């Protein structure tokens, strides 16, 4: 199993990249279907990234208790 922290960072980076592409797309061609798709993907990636980072800290805290 991959480490939750590295997965979280990866998803956060992907969220930033999708956000950047969405901003570029709005500046070039306005609000279209592809822009909304990029925003949805960025939102999902940010949510997954934060969830993985929270899991990492919960596992770390659980290991300290043992």
Image: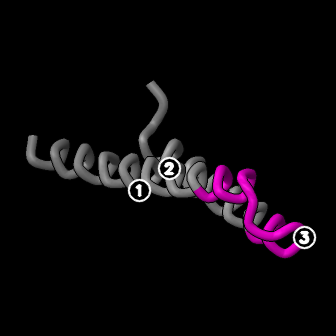
Closer to us: 17 or 57: 17
Q: Is residue 9 visible?
A: no
In the displayed structure, does residue 52 sit left or right of residue 13?
left
In the displayed structure, does residue 27 sit left or right of residue 54?
right
Residue located 72% across and 58% down the image:
35
Which SS type dominates the magenta stretch?
A: helix
Separation of disc 2 and disc 1 at Cα?
Answer: 10 Å
Residue located 75% across and 71% down the image:
23
Q: Nearer the viewer, mark 2 or mark 3?
A: 3
Closer to us: 1 or 41: 41
Is residue 32 covered in magenta?
A: yes
Counting residues from the start of the chain, the first of labels 2 and 1 encountered is 2
Q: Identify the residue under disc 1.
A: 50
Q: Residues within 10 Å of mark 2 (few under 14, many from 20)?
A: some
Task: Tell me the quarter of the image containing the C terminus.
Answer: top left
Counting residues from the start of the chain, the first of labels 2 and 3 encountered is 3
In the displayed structure, does residue 48 sit left or right of residue 57?
right
Separation of disc 2 and disc 3 at Cα?
Answer: 24 Å
Is residue 43 covered in magenta?
A: no
Residue located 59% across and 49% down the image:
41
User: Which percent across, then down, holds residue 8?
Assistant: 48, 49
Residue located 53% across and 50% down the image:
45
Mark 2 and mark 3 residues within 8 Å of each other at the beta carbon: no
Please count the marks in the image: 3
Chain part drawn in magenta: 23-39
Separation of disc 1 and disc 3 at Cα?
Answer: 30 Å
Farthest right residue in view:
28
Q: Nearer the viewer, mark 2 or mark 1?
A: 2
Q: Identify the residue under disc 3.
A: 28
Q: Is residue 62 visible?
A: yes
Q: Residues within 10 Å of mark 3 (few under 14, many from 20)?
A: few
Q: Identify the residue under disc 2.
A: 44
């Amino acid at each position: 199993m991959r480490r939750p922290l590295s997965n979280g960072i990866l998803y956060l980076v992907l969220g930033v990249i999708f956000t950047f592409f969405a901003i570029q797309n709005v500046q070039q061609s306005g609000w279209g279907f592809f822009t909304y798709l990029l925003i949805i993907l960025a939102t999902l990636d940010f949510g997954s990234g934060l969830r993985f980072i929270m899991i990492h800290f919960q596992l770390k805290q659980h290991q300290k208790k043992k």
